[in-house]
Image: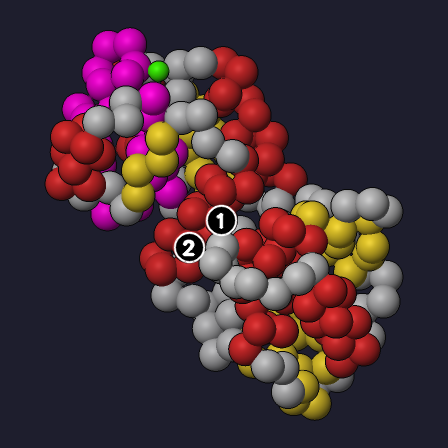
Amino acid sequence: MATVLIVEDELSINKLISKNLTLIGHTCLSAYDGVSAVNMLTETPPDLIILDVMLPGLSGFDVIRRVDGIPVIFVSARVGLEDRLRGLDLGAEDYIVKPFEMQELLARVNVVLRRFKKNTDVLTVDGVTVDFGSRTVHRSGVPIELTSKEFALLETLIQNRNIALSRDKLLDLVWSYDYAGDTRTVDVHVQQLRKKLGWKDRICTVYKVGYRFDL
Ligand code: CA
């Protein structure tokens, strides 16, 4: 997994992002102002930077100018189109407006990390190997055929490991927001995944919520 530098002067937000990213397996570093962020870049270069725009000392827009080759996601309370465009213009991969849903931030972090690590991640659990680069799955060395939705669901569950996801959230993330189907679609796909991968306990049912991939 990745090392993520969180640059955010609001202690509670910084801690919350850090806690959630750590939960899904990332290593987090925190900076609370622009100057320390720039110093940390040279000491321990992270794989990704989550960067607030309004910071004491150097602003996020100043900090990104000193970043070379590391993807940046801006998080900002500044909702104006001008700020958003400026952020993207300066080379940010994404720009998320505060307040945001943690799930959305995690999803976008994963998208950016995948893009930059050129999809080479492989996860092996209980004899099942999931290759996110080739989008293939093997169980005890034998290839397992998954439909594209089954793979997308598996990917989403793994990316949000140890976090309970509601059926609605899974519909949003895997089938996209405008999908007209109902949540039983999610149940059917989860059953299929459990059967194909032998992951009855790994993908657990969270009572009255949905599902969680335990690792
Ligand atoms: Ca701030």
What residue is shown with label 2? 111
| Nearer to us in this view, 177 or 200 | 177
Height in image: 101 above or below 99? below
Residue 144, percent from left and from top? 67, 86
Span shown in magenta: 48-77
Amino acid, disc 2 = Val
Q: Secondary structure at mark 1?
A: helix
Any part of residue 70 in sight: no
> Which residue is drawn at the image coordinates 45% and 68% (left, top)?
120
Colouring used for the render:
secondary structure
Residue underneath mark 1: 107
Q: Is residue 41 magenta?
A: no
Horizontal side of 11 relative to 7 (left or right) equals: right
- Which quadrant of the view contains residue 61? top left
CB at disc 1 and ligand 1 closer than 8 Å: no
> Which is more toward the observer, 62 or 188?
188
**Quarter of the rendering containing residue 82:** top left
The reply to whether callout 2 and callout 1 are in contact (CB within 8 Å) is: yes
Q: Residue furthest bottom?
A: 142
Question: Where is residue 180 drawn, in percent x and y?
Answer: 56, 63
Quarter of the rendered image showing ligand 1? top left
Say which quarter of the image contains residue 79.
top left
Q: Is residue 205 visible?
A: yes
Q: Secondary structure at mark 2?
A: helix
